[in-house]
Amino acid sequence: MVLRWRCSPLLLLSLLLQSFVSADHSFENTAVVRTVEVAGSLVQVTTTFAVKALEGDASEYTIALGEREHERTSWLEAKIKGQAAILPLFEGGYDPEIGVHFYTVALPHAMKINETANLVVETVETHATYPWPEQASQKDPQSLKYETDLFVVSPYKTLVERIKFRTPTPNIHSYTNPPGLDDFTVEIPVTKSGATITYGPFNNIPITSAKEFLDAKQEHVAVHYAYDSPLVEVMKLKRSAEISHWGANLNIEDTFHLRNAGPALKGHFSRLEHQSTMFYGRPPPHVLPSLTVQLPAGIHSPYYYDLIGNVSTSHLRTSPSQGKNGRSQPSLLELRPRYPLMGGWNYTFTLGWDSPLADYSSYEKATGKYIVGIPLMTMIPGAVVDEAEINIILPEAATDVDYYPPFVPTESGITTHVTYLDTVGRPAIVLRYGRLTHKHAGVIYVTYKVPVTAHLKKPLAVATAFMGLFALGFLAKRLDISIQKK
Amino acid sequence: MADYQAVHVFHRTLPSFSPSVPVGLLPYLAFLLLAATFVLAFYFSTLPTDKVPIREVAVASLASILAGFGVVAMFCTVGVYV
Protein backbone atom coordinates (compact mmCIF):
# COMPACT_ATOMS: atom_id res chain seq x y z
CA MET A 1 0.00 0.00 0.00
CA VAL A 2 1.31 3.44 -0.87
CA LEU A 3 0.34 5.72 1.97
CA ARG A 4 0.97 9.39 2.53
CA TRP A 5 3.69 10.50 4.93
CA ARG A 6 1.42 10.24 7.97
CA CYS A 7 2.54 6.99 9.56
CA SER A 8 4.54 8.02 12.56
CA PRO A 9 6.65 5.06 13.70
CA LEU A 10 7.29 6.68 17.07
CA LEU A 11 3.60 6.65 17.90
CA LEU A 12 3.14 3.15 16.54
CA LEU A 13 3.89 1.17 19.68
CA SER A 14 1.76 3.28 21.99
CA LEU A 15 -1.15 3.22 19.61
CA LEU A 16 -0.82 -0.53 19.13
CA LEU A 17 -1.45 -1.23 22.81
CA GLN A 18 -4.16 1.35 23.06
CA SER A 19 -6.05 0.18 20.02
CA PHE A 20 -6.16 -3.46 21.08
CA VAL A 21 -7.37 -2.70 24.57
CA SER A 22 -9.94 -0.02 23.92
CA ALA A 23 -10.98 -0.75 20.32
CA ASP A 24 -13.74 -3.18 21.07
CA HIS A 25 -15.70 -1.00 23.42
CA SER A 26 -15.16 2.65 22.69
CA PHE A 27 -17.29 2.90 19.54
CA GLU A 28 -20.34 1.40 17.92
CA ASN A 29 -21.23 1.54 14.22
CA THR A 30 -24.85 2.63 14.08
CA ALA A 31 -24.83 2.24 10.30
CA VAL A 32 -22.29 1.09 7.72
CA VAL A 33 -22.78 1.59 4.00
CA ARG A 34 -20.14 0.25 1.62
CA THR A 35 -20.21 1.14 -2.09
CA VAL A 36 -17.90 -0.87 -4.29
CA GLU A 37 -17.45 0.66 -7.72
CA VAL A 38 -16.10 -2.12 -9.89
CA ALA A 39 -14.47 -1.00 -13.09
CA GLY A 40 -11.47 -2.34 -14.97
CA SER A 41 -8.10 -2.56 -13.27
CA LEU A 42 -9.17 -0.33 -10.38
CA VAL A 43 -11.97 -0.89 -7.87
CA GLN A 44 -12.99 2.02 -5.64
CA VAL A 45 -14.46 1.11 -2.30
CA THR A 46 -16.15 3.83 -0.24
CA THR A 47 -17.28 2.82 3.23
CA THR A 48 -19.30 5.25 5.34
CA PHE A 49 -19.32 4.51 9.06
CA ALA A 50 -21.92 6.27 11.21
CA VAL A 51 -20.11 5.96 14.53
CA LYS A 52 -21.31 6.57 18.04
CA ALA A 53 -18.88 6.93 20.92
CA LEU A 54 -19.69 4.64 23.81
CA GLU A 55 -16.98 6.02 26.06
CA GLY A 56 -15.98 9.59 26.69
CA ASP A 57 -12.82 11.13 25.26
CA ALA A 58 -12.68 8.73 22.30
CA SER A 59 -10.33 10.17 19.69
CA GLU A 60 -9.06 7.15 17.73
CA TYR A 61 -11.19 4.98 15.53
CA THR A 62 -9.84 1.67 14.24
CA ILE A 63 -10.58 0.39 10.77
CA ALA A 64 -9.77 -3.14 9.73
CA LEU A 65 -8.92 -4.75 6.42
CA GLY A 66 -9.19 -8.46 5.76
CA GLU A 67 -6.23 -10.39 4.35
CA ARG A 68 -7.32 -10.38 0.71
CA GLU A 69 -8.63 -6.84 0.97
CA HIS A 70 -5.34 -5.57 2.38
CA GLU A 71 -3.29 -7.32 -0.28
CA ARG A 72 -5.24 -5.59 -3.03
CA THR A 73 -5.56 -2.14 -1.46
CA SER A 74 -3.09 0.44 -2.66
CA TRP A 75 -4.76 3.62 -1.36
CA LEU A 76 -6.46 4.30 1.94
CA GLU A 77 -7.90 7.60 3.04
CA ALA A 78 -10.29 8.61 5.82
CA LYS A 79 -12.31 11.81 6.11
CA ILE A 80 -15.24 13.13 8.06
CA LYS A 81 -18.24 13.31 5.73
CA GLY A 82 -18.66 16.79 4.35
CA GLN A 83 -15.19 17.97 5.36
CA ALA A 84 -12.22 18.20 3.04
CA ALA A 85 -9.50 17.60 5.64
CA ILE A 86 -7.83 14.19 5.37
CA LEU A 87 -7.53 12.54 8.78
CA PRO A 88 -4.15 11.21 9.93
CA LEU A 89 -3.87 7.46 9.61
CA PHE A 90 -1.53 5.21 11.57
CA GLU A 91 -0.75 1.53 11.22
CA GLY A 92 -2.48 -0.26 14.05
CA GLY A 93 -1.02 -3.73 13.85
CA TYR A 94 -1.72 -7.10 12.27
CA ASP A 95 -3.46 -10.09 13.80
CA PRO A 96 -1.85 -13.18 12.19
CA GLU A 97 -4.47 -15.61 13.53
CA ILE A 98 -7.28 -14.05 11.54
CA GLY A 99 -5.14 -12.22 8.96
CA VAL A 100 -6.63 -8.81 9.65
CA HIS A 101 -4.71 -5.54 9.37
CA PHE A 102 -5.72 -2.62 11.57
CA TYR A 103 -5.37 1.10 10.92
CA THR A 104 -6.10 3.85 13.41
CA VAL A 105 -7.73 7.08 12.34
CA ALA A 106 -7.15 10.15 14.50
CA LEU A 107 -10.49 11.93 14.74
CA PRO A 108 -10.42 15.75 14.54
CA HIS A 109 -11.56 16.09 18.15
CA ALA A 110 -12.16 13.69 21.01
CA MET A 111 -15.78 12.55 20.99
CA LYS A 112 -17.93 12.78 24.11
CA ILE A 113 -20.04 9.86 25.23
CA ASN A 114 -22.99 9.16 22.85
CA GLU A 115 -21.71 11.67 20.33
CA THR A 116 -22.04 10.61 16.67
CA ALA A 117 -19.96 11.27 13.56
CA ASN A 118 -19.87 10.09 9.94
CA LEU A 119 -16.52 8.73 8.84
CA VAL A 120 -15.88 8.09 5.14
CA VAL A 121 -13.10 5.63 4.33
CA GLU A 122 -12.03 5.39 0.69
CA THR A 123 -9.80 2.67 -0.66
CA VAL A 124 -8.65 1.81 -4.15
CA GLU A 125 -8.00 -1.84 -4.96
CA THR A 126 -5.74 -2.90 -7.80
CA HIS A 127 -5.68 -6.21 -9.69
CA ALA A 128 -8.90 -7.17 -7.97
CA THR A 129 -10.80 -8.01 -11.15
CA TYR A 130 -9.89 -10.62 -13.72
CA PRO A 131 -11.21 -11.35 -17.19
CA TRP A 132 -13.76 -14.14 -17.28
CA PRO A 133 -13.77 -15.97 -19.73
CA GLU A 134 -10.01 -15.80 -19.74
CA GLN A 135 -9.72 -16.02 -23.49
CA ALA A 136 -11.62 -14.16 -26.16
CA SER A 137 -11.31 -14.09 -29.90
CA GLN A 138 -11.04 -10.80 -31.77
CA LYS A 139 -14.82 -10.41 -32.13
CA ASP A 140 -15.90 -11.51 -28.64
CA PRO A 141 -17.08 -9.13 -25.91
CA GLN A 142 -15.16 -8.63 -22.65
CA SER A 143 -16.41 -9.59 -19.19
CA LEU A 144 -14.74 -9.27 -15.82
CA LYS A 145 -15.27 -10.95 -12.48
CA TYR A 146 -14.78 -9.41 -9.06
CA GLU A 147 -14.65 -11.56 -5.93
CA THR A 148 -14.62 -10.29 -2.39
CA ASP A 149 -15.73 -10.95 1.16
CA LEU A 150 -19.17 -9.59 1.88
CA PHE A 151 -19.29 -8.24 5.41
CA VAL A 152 -17.28 -5.18 6.35
CA VAL A 153 -14.49 -6.18 8.74
CA SER A 154 -14.64 -3.92 11.77
CA PRO A 155 -13.54 -4.23 15.40
CA TYR A 156 -16.85 -2.70 16.56
CA LYS A 157 -20.44 -3.92 16.55
CA THR A 158 -22.64 -2.80 13.68
CA LEU A 159 -26.35 -2.16 13.94
CA VAL A 160 -27.25 -1.82 10.24
CA GLU A 161 -25.10 -2.64 7.22
CA ARG A 162 -25.60 -2.35 3.46
CA ILE A 163 -23.13 -3.30 0.75
CA LYS A 164 -23.63 -2.02 -2.79
CA PHE A 165 -21.78 -3.04 -5.93
CA ARG A 166 -21.89 -0.61 -8.82
CA THR A 167 -20.82 -1.73 -12.29
CA PRO A 168 -20.07 0.61 -15.20
CA THR A 169 -22.99 -0.74 -17.26
CA PRO A 170 -26.25 -2.48 -16.28
CA ASN A 171 -25.06 -5.52 -18.21
CA ILE A 172 -24.40 -7.86 -15.23
CA HIS A 173 -24.17 -11.54 -16.09
CA SER A 174 -24.43 -12.96 -12.58
CA TYR A 175 -23.92 -12.22 -8.89
CA THR A 176 -23.77 -14.43 -5.83
CA ASN A 177 -26.88 -14.99 -3.75
CA PRO A 178 -25.31 -16.44 -0.63
CA PRO A 179 -27.45 -18.70 1.55
CA GLY A 180 -27.36 -18.64 5.32
CA LEU A 181 -27.81 -14.93 5.90
CA ASP A 182 -30.92 -15.50 8.04
CA ASP A 183 -29.03 -14.49 11.16
CA PHE A 184 -28.85 -10.95 9.95
CA THR A 185 -31.83 -10.35 7.76
CA VAL A 186 -35.34 -11.67 7.23
CA GLU A 187 -35.91 -10.02 3.84
CA ILE A 188 -34.36 -10.97 0.48
CA PRO A 189 -30.65 -10.30 0.99
CA VAL A 190 -29.77 -9.30 -2.61
CA THR A 191 -31.48 -6.94 -5.01
CA LYS A 192 -30.38 -5.65 -8.41
CA SER A 193 -31.48 -2.32 -9.77
CA GLY A 194 -29.90 -1.19 -13.04
CA ALA A 195 -26.16 -1.20 -12.52
CA THR A 196 -26.33 -1.52 -8.70
CA ILE A 197 -26.49 -4.72 -6.67
CA THR A 198 -27.46 -4.16 -3.03
CA TYR A 199 -26.73 -6.70 -0.31
CA GLY A 200 -28.63 -5.99 2.88
CA PRO A 201 -29.78 -4.36 5.03
CA PHE A 202 -28.17 -6.63 7.61
CA ASN A 203 -28.94 -6.04 11.27
CA ASN A 204 -27.00 -6.51 14.49
CA ILE A 205 -23.70 -7.73 13.17
CA PRO A 206 -21.21 -8.58 15.94
CA ILE A 207 -17.53 -7.72 15.92
CA THR A 208 -16.40 -9.01 12.53
CA SER A 209 -12.65 -8.89 13.12
CA ALA A 210 -12.90 -12.03 15.19
CA LYS A 211 -12.02 -15.61 14.33
CA GLU A 212 -15.50 -16.99 15.04
CA PHE A 213 -17.18 -14.59 12.68
CA LEU A 214 -14.60 -14.80 9.87
CA ASP A 215 -14.55 -18.58 9.86
CA ALA A 216 -18.26 -19.21 10.18
CA LYS A 217 -20.28 -16.24 9.01
CA GLN A 218 -18.20 -14.34 6.44
CA GLU A 219 -19.57 -14.85 2.93
CA HIS A 220 -17.71 -14.72 -0.36
CA VAL A 221 -19.48 -12.99 -3.20
CA ALA A 222 -18.63 -12.55 -6.83
CA VAL A 223 -19.99 -10.24 -9.52
CA HIS A 224 -19.62 -11.08 -13.20
CA TYR A 225 -20.21 -8.09 -15.47
CA ALA A 226 -19.50 -6.80 -18.97
CA TYR A 227 -16.80 -4.19 -19.36
CA ASP A 228 -16.66 -2.00 -22.44
CA SER A 229 -13.19 -0.47 -22.31
CA PRO A 230 -9.80 -2.08 -22.69
CA LEU A 231 -7.96 -2.91 -19.48
CA VAL A 232 -4.68 -1.07 -19.46
CA GLU A 233 -1.89 -2.06 -17.14
CA VAL A 234 1.51 -0.40 -16.93
CA MET A 235 3.87 -3.12 -15.78
CA LYS A 236 6.84 -0.83 -15.41
CA LEU A 237 7.18 2.94 -15.61
CA LYS A 238 10.56 4.63 -15.62
CA ARG A 239 10.49 8.40 -15.34
CA SER A 240 13.55 10.55 -15.75
CA ALA A 241 13.38 14.29 -15.00
CA GLU A 242 16.49 16.23 -15.96
CA ILE A 243 16.97 19.80 -14.78
CA SER A 244 19.13 22.18 -16.79
CA HIS A 245 20.02 25.60 -15.46
CA TRP A 246 21.87 26.76 -18.57
CA GLY A 247 18.93 26.01 -20.81
CA ALA A 248 16.29 26.81 -18.15
CA ASN A 249 14.64 23.54 -19.10
CA LEU A 250 13.05 20.50 -17.49
CA ASN A 251 13.14 17.40 -19.66
CA ILE A 252 10.82 14.57 -18.63
CA GLU A 253 11.14 11.17 -20.24
CA ASP A 254 8.80 8.27 -19.49
CA THR A 255 9.39 4.69 -20.54
CA PHE A 256 6.20 2.66 -20.37
CA HIS A 257 5.86 -1.14 -20.45
CA LEU A 258 2.21 -1.32 -21.36
CA ARG A 259 0.07 -4.43 -21.26
CA ASN A 260 -3.50 -5.15 -22.22
CA ALA A 261 -4.72 -7.07 -19.17
CA GLY A 262 -7.95 -8.18 -20.84
CA PRO A 263 -8.86 -11.70 -21.97
CA ALA A 264 -6.02 -13.33 -23.91
CA LEU A 265 -6.47 -13.46 -27.66
CA LYS A 266 -7.92 -16.79 -28.78
CA GLY A 267 -6.94 -17.75 -32.29
CA HIS A 268 -4.94 -15.53 -34.55
CA PHE A 269 -4.98 -11.78 -35.12
CA SER A 270 -6.68 -10.86 -38.36
CA ARG A 271 -5.56 -7.48 -39.70
CA LEU A 272 -8.49 -7.49 -42.12
CA GLU A 273 -10.99 -8.03 -39.32
CA HIS A 274 -9.35 -5.31 -37.28
CA GLN A 275 -9.40 -2.76 -40.09
CA SER A 276 -13.02 -3.45 -40.91
CA THR A 277 -14.12 -2.96 -37.27
CA MET A 278 -12.11 0.27 -37.06
CA PHE A 279 -13.68 1.51 -40.27
CA TYR A 280 -17.29 0.70 -39.46
CA GLY A 281 -17.55 1.69 -35.85
CA ARG A 282 -16.16 0.94 -32.43
CA PRO A 283 -13.63 -1.86 -32.11
CA PRO A 284 -14.34 -4.75 -29.70
CA PRO A 285 -14.00 -3.72 -26.05
CA HIS A 286 -10.81 -5.62 -25.30
CA VAL A 287 -8.78 -4.14 -28.15
CA LEU A 288 -6.62 -1.09 -27.43
CA PRO A 289 -6.01 0.81 -30.66
CA SER A 290 -5.01 4.14 -29.13
CA LEU A 291 -4.44 5.93 -25.84
CA THR A 292 -5.11 9.49 -24.76
CA VAL A 293 -2.70 10.85 -22.20
CA GLN A 294 -2.78 14.18 -20.39
CA LEU A 295 0.53 15.99 -20.27
CA PRO A 296 1.42 19.22 -18.48
CA ALA A 297 0.78 22.63 -20.08
CA GLY A 298 3.48 24.61 -21.83
CA ILE A 299 5.47 21.64 -23.15
CA HIS A 300 7.35 21.57 -26.44
CA SER A 301 9.53 19.25 -28.51
CA PRO A 302 7.82 15.96 -27.59
CA TYR A 303 9.23 12.68 -28.82
CA TYR A 304 7.68 9.23 -28.96
CA TYR A 305 9.75 6.23 -29.97
CA ASP A 306 9.95 2.53 -29.30
CA LEU A 307 12.50 -0.21 -29.87
CA ILE A 308 12.13 -0.05 -33.64
CA GLY A 309 12.42 3.73 -33.90
CA ASN A 310 10.30 6.83 -34.02
CA VAL A 311 6.54 6.33 -33.96
CA SER A 312 4.80 8.96 -36.01
CA THR A 313 1.20 8.04 -35.17
CA SER A 314 0.62 10.56 -32.42
CA HIS A 315 -1.00 13.96 -32.15
CA LEU A 316 -0.23 16.51 -29.47
CA ARG A 317 -2.46 19.45 -28.66
CA THR A 318 -0.46 21.74 -26.38
CA SER A 319 -2.08 24.15 -24.01
CA PRO A 320 -0.33 27.39 -23.02
CA SER A 321 1.47 27.49 -19.71
CA GLN A 322 0.11 29.69 -16.92
CA GLY A 323 3.34 29.69 -14.94
CA LYS A 324 4.32 27.96 -11.72
CA ASN A 325 1.19 28.74 -9.73
CA GLY A 326 -1.33 29.21 -12.51
CA ARG A 327 -4.22 26.84 -13.15
CA SER A 328 -3.61 25.59 -16.66
CA GLN A 329 -5.39 23.14 -18.94
CA PRO A 330 -3.49 19.93 -19.60
CA SER A 331 -1.99 19.22 -23.02
CA LEU A 332 -3.56 16.27 -24.77
CA LEU A 333 -1.54 13.59 -26.50
CA GLU A 334 -3.26 10.92 -28.56
CA LEU A 335 -0.92 8.02 -29.12
CA ARG A 336 -1.45 5.12 -31.42
CA PRO A 337 0.95 2.26 -30.69
CA ARG A 338 2.63 0.64 -33.64
CA TYR A 339 0.11 -2.19 -33.51
CA PRO A 340 -3.28 -2.48 -31.78
CA LEU A 341 -2.93 -4.18 -28.42
CA MET A 342 -5.00 -7.35 -28.20
CA GLY A 343 -5.65 -9.08 -24.90
CA GLY A 344 -2.43 -10.19 -23.27
CA TRP A 345 -0.17 -8.21 -25.63
CA ASN A 346 2.61 -5.93 -24.47
CA TYR A 347 4.04 -2.72 -25.87
CA THR A 348 7.07 -0.76 -24.69
CA PHE A 349 7.62 2.85 -25.68
CA THR A 350 9.37 6.02 -24.59
CA LEU A 351 7.64 9.36 -24.41
CA GLY A 352 9.48 12.57 -23.58
CA TRP A 353 9.13 16.34 -23.70
CA ASP A 354 10.78 19.60 -22.69
CA SER A 355 9.19 22.28 -20.57
CA PRO A 356 10.37 25.66 -19.24
CA LEU A 357 12.02 25.31 -15.84
CA ALA A 358 10.29 28.45 -14.55
CA ASP A 359 7.00 26.48 -14.43
CA TYR A 360 8.42 24.00 -11.96
CA SER A 361 11.26 25.64 -10.07
CA SER A 362 11.57 28.51 -7.64
CA TYR A 363 14.59 30.26 -6.16
CA GLU A 364 15.21 31.73 -2.73
CA LYS A 365 17.79 34.48 -3.13
CA ALA A 366 18.63 34.76 0.58
CA THR A 367 19.89 31.19 0.96
CA GLY A 368 20.56 30.37 -2.69
CA LYS A 369 18.15 27.42 -2.47
CA TYR A 370 16.24 26.08 -5.44
CA ILE A 371 12.96 24.21 -4.96
CA VAL A 372 11.63 22.17 -7.85
CA GLY A 373 8.32 20.32 -7.98
CA ILE A 374 8.31 17.29 -10.31
CA PRO A 375 4.99 15.53 -11.05
CA LEU A 376 5.13 11.91 -9.92
CA MET A 377 3.81 10.27 -13.08
CA THR A 378 1.86 10.73 -16.28
CA MET A 379 -1.66 9.47 -15.81
CA ILE A 380 -2.99 6.85 -18.17
CA PRO A 381 -6.67 6.89 -17.26
CA GLY A 382 -7.86 3.79 -15.47
CA ALA A 383 -4.45 2.13 -15.43
CA VAL A 384 -2.47 0.70 -12.56
CA VAL A 385 1.30 1.11 -12.49
CA ASP A 386 2.86 -2.04 -11.02
CA GLU A 387 6.38 -0.73 -10.63
CA ALA A 388 7.57 2.84 -10.94
CA GLU A 389 11.07 4.24 -10.83
CA ILE A 390 11.53 8.00 -10.78
CA ASN A 391 14.93 9.58 -11.37
CA ILE A 392 15.35 13.28 -10.74
CA ILE A 393 18.63 14.46 -12.22
CA LEU A 394 19.88 17.69 -10.70
CA PRO A 395 22.45 20.08 -12.20
CA GLU A 396 26.12 19.28 -11.72
CA ALA A 397 27.68 20.03 -8.32
CA ALA A 398 24.31 20.47 -6.60
CA THR A 399 24.73 20.42 -2.81
CA ASP A 400 22.37 20.15 0.19
CA VAL A 401 20.04 17.89 -1.76
CA ASP A 402 16.77 17.08 0.03
CA TYR A 403 13.64 15.48 -1.36
CA TYR A 404 10.02 15.39 -0.18
CA PRO A 405 7.90 12.78 -1.94
CA PRO A 406 4.12 12.92 -1.36
CA PHE A 407 3.98 9.17 -0.66
CA VAL A 408 6.30 6.81 1.13
CA PRO A 409 8.56 5.16 -1.50
CA THR A 410 9.61 1.53 -1.28
CA GLU A 411 13.20 2.52 -2.02
CA SER A 412 14.96 5.84 -2.31
CA GLY A 413 18.50 7.05 -2.67
CA ILE A 414 20.91 9.40 -4.39
CA THR A 415 23.24 8.21 -7.15
CA THR A 416 25.46 9.91 -9.70
CA HIS A 417 24.38 10.33 -13.29
CA VAL A 418 26.84 11.30 -16.03
CA THR A 419 25.64 12.94 -19.22
CA TYR A 420 26.83 15.45 -21.86
CA LEU A 421 29.55 17.92 -20.87
CA ASP A 422 29.76 16.56 -17.31
CA THR A 423 33.00 16.38 -15.36
CA VAL A 424 32.14 14.97 -11.94
CA GLY A 425 28.62 13.81 -12.73
CA ARG A 426 25.24 14.99 -11.47
CA PRO A 427 23.40 13.90 -8.33
CA ALA A 428 20.31 11.88 -9.25
CA ILE A 429 17.55 11.04 -6.79
CA VAL A 430 16.01 7.62 -7.34
CA LEU A 431 12.56 6.79 -5.93
CA ARG A 432 10.78 3.48 -6.38
CA TYR A 433 7.09 2.83 -5.95
CA GLY A 434 4.75 -0.10 -6.43
CA ARG A 435 1.07 -0.22 -7.40
CA LEU A 436 0.31 3.38 -8.20
CA THR A 437 -3.18 4.50 -9.22
CA HIS A 438 -4.75 7.77 -10.30
CA LYS A 439 -5.01 8.73 -6.61
CA HIS A 440 -1.23 8.83 -6.44
CA ALA A 441 -0.80 11.74 -8.83
CA GLY A 442 1.30 14.04 -6.70
CA VAL A 443 4.34 16.29 -6.86
CA ILE A 444 7.80 15.43 -5.54
CA TYR A 445 9.60 18.45 -4.13
CA VAL A 446 13.38 18.61 -4.26
CA THR A 447 15.51 21.34 -2.72
CA TYR A 448 19.16 21.90 -3.61
CA LYS A 449 21.79 24.60 -3.89
CA VAL A 450 24.15 25.25 -6.79
CA PRO A 451 26.96 27.73 -6.21
CA VAL A 452 27.66 30.19 -9.06
CA THR A 453 31.09 28.68 -9.68
CA ALA A 454 29.49 25.31 -10.28
CA HIS A 455 27.55 26.80 -13.19
CA LEU A 456 30.86 27.68 -14.82
CA LYS A 457 32.15 24.09 -14.67
CA LYS A 458 30.71 23.19 -18.03
CA PRO A 459 32.12 26.06 -20.08
CA LEU A 460 35.47 25.57 -18.35
CA ALA A 461 35.50 21.88 -19.20
CA VAL A 462 34.86 22.67 -22.86
CA ALA A 463 37.44 25.48 -22.75
CA THR A 464 40.03 23.05 -21.40
CA ALA A 465 39.33 20.63 -24.24
CA PHE A 466 39.76 23.42 -26.79
CA MET A 467 42.94 24.56 -25.04
CA GLY A 468 44.25 21.04 -25.47
CA LEU A 469 43.59 21.30 -29.22
CA PHE A 470 45.36 24.65 -29.33
CA ALA A 471 48.31 23.13 -27.46
CA LEU A 472 48.50 20.42 -30.12
CA GLY A 473 48.47 23.13 -32.78
CA PHE A 474 51.17 24.97 -30.88
CA LEU A 475 53.39 21.88 -30.91
CA ALA A 476 52.61 21.10 -34.53
CA LYS A 477 53.86 24.52 -35.59
CA ARG A 478 57.18 23.87 -33.98
CA LEU A 479 57.73 20.43 -35.45
CA ASP A 480 59.83 20.27 -38.56
CA ILE A 481 58.46 17.46 -40.70
CA SER A 482 60.12 18.43 -43.96
CA ILE A 483 62.02 15.64 -45.66
CA GLN A 484 64.94 17.81 -46.71
CA LYS A 485 66.74 20.14 -44.32
CA LYS A 486 65.94 23.77 -45.06
CA MET B 1 4.09 15.43 6.48
CA ALA B 2 4.40 18.87 7.99
CA ASP B 3 7.64 19.15 6.04
CA TYR B 4 5.89 18.33 2.77
CA GLN B 5 3.18 20.91 3.35
CA ALA B 6 5.77 23.51 4.35
CA VAL B 7 7.81 22.91 1.18
CA HIS B 8 4.64 23.03 -0.92
CA VAL B 9 3.66 26.43 0.47
CA PHE B 10 7.22 27.69 0.25
CA HIS B 11 7.45 26.64 -3.39
CA ARG B 12 4.27 28.49 -4.24
CA THR B 13 5.32 31.75 -2.63
CA LEU B 14 8.91 32.01 -3.89
CA PRO B 15 9.71 33.68 -7.23
CA SER B 16 10.13 31.43 -10.26
CA PHE B 17 13.49 30.30 -11.52
CA SER B 18 15.08 32.66 -14.01
CA PRO B 19 18.33 31.80 -15.78
CA SER B 20 21.35 34.12 -15.72
CA VAL B 21 21.31 34.28 -19.51
CA PRO B 22 17.84 34.63 -21.13
CA VAL B 23 17.00 31.54 -23.13
CA GLY B 24 15.90 33.50 -26.20
CA LEU B 25 19.39 34.95 -26.52
CA LEU B 26 21.17 31.60 -26.51
CA PRO B 27 21.05 30.87 -30.29
CA TYR B 28 22.50 34.31 -31.11
CA LEU B 29 25.11 34.04 -28.38
CA ALA B 30 26.09 30.61 -29.67
CA PHE B 31 26.54 31.90 -33.19
CA LEU B 32 28.53 34.97 -32.14
CA LEU B 33 30.79 33.15 -29.71
CA LEU B 34 31.55 30.30 -32.08
CA ALA B 35 32.18 32.71 -34.96
CA ALA B 36 34.62 34.61 -32.75
CA THR B 37 36.30 31.33 -31.78
CA PHE B 38 36.66 30.39 -35.43
CA VAL B 39 38.23 33.76 -36.30
CA LEU B 40 40.61 33.61 -33.35
CA ALA B 41 41.62 30.05 -34.14
CA PHE B 42 42.43 31.07 -37.69
CA TYR B 43 44.43 34.01 -36.35
CA PHE B 44 46.25 31.64 -33.99
CA SER B 45 47.29 29.52 -36.93
CA THR B 46 48.87 32.51 -38.67
CA LEU B 47 50.89 33.71 -35.68
CA PRO B 48 54.68 33.38 -35.97
CA THR B 49 56.44 31.08 -33.52
CA ASP B 50 58.28 33.13 -30.84
CA LYS B 51 60.65 32.06 -28.13
CA VAL B 52 58.29 33.32 -25.43
CA PRO B 53 54.84 32.51 -26.84
CA ILE B 54 52.84 35.17 -24.97
CA ARG B 55 50.69 36.18 -27.94
CA GLU B 56 49.91 32.59 -28.91
CA VAL B 57 48.92 31.63 -25.37
CA ALA B 58 46.76 34.75 -25.00
CA VAL B 59 44.92 34.17 -28.27
CA ALA B 60 44.50 30.46 -27.53
CA SER B 61 43.11 31.13 -24.03
CA LEU B 62 40.67 33.74 -25.26
CA ALA B 63 39.53 31.45 -28.07
CA SER B 64 39.08 28.53 -25.61
CA ILE B 65 36.99 30.53 -23.18
CA LEU B 66 34.77 31.84 -25.98
CA ALA B 67 34.51 28.30 -27.33
CA GLY B 68 33.50 26.97 -23.91
CA PHE B 69 30.54 29.30 -23.59
CA GLY B 70 29.74 29.02 -27.28
CA VAL B 71 29.53 25.22 -27.17
CA VAL B 72 27.30 25.23 -24.08
CA ALA B 73 24.99 27.79 -25.75
CA MET B 74 25.01 25.69 -28.94
CA PHE B 75 24.04 22.53 -27.08
CA CYS B 76 21.10 24.34 -25.49
CA THR B 77 20.04 25.81 -28.83
CA VAL B 78 19.83 22.44 -30.57
CA GLY B 79 17.79 20.91 -27.76
CA VAL B 80 20.36 19.05 -25.69
CA TYR B 81 19.76 21.00 -22.51
CA VAL B 82 23.02 20.45 -20.63
Image (cartoon, grey):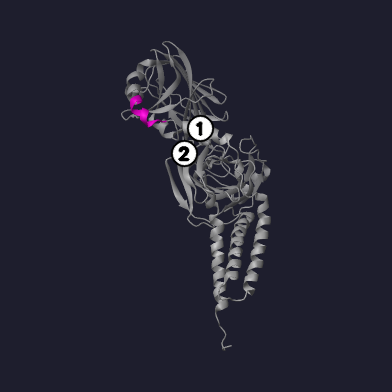
Q: Is residue A320 visible?
A: yes
Q: Position of residue A203 (x, y in %)?
A: 43, 14
Instruction: Find residue B27 and report its image quarter.
Output: bottom right
Give the residue pinned by disc 1. B6
Q: CA distance from mark 2 to mark 1?
A: 27 Å
Give the residue pinned by disc 2. A435
Quadrant location of the N terminus of chain A? top left
Quadrant location of the C terminus of chain A? bottom right
Nearest to the observer: residue A265 or residue A218 = A218
Of the two numbered discs 2 and 1 in the rendering, the one whose residue sits closer to the viewer: 1
B44 over A64 or under it: above or below: below
SS category of the residue bearing label 1: helix
Label 1 chain ID? B
Q: Amino acid at mark 2?
A: Arg
Q: Does the magenta stretch mainly form a helix, a strand or a loop?
A: helix
Crowding near the residue tagged with mark 1, few <14, some 14–19, many ≥20 C-alpha atoms within 10 Å: few
User: What residue span does the magenta drawing correspond to?
Assistant: A7-15
Q: Position of residue A67 (x, y in %)?
A: 38, 31
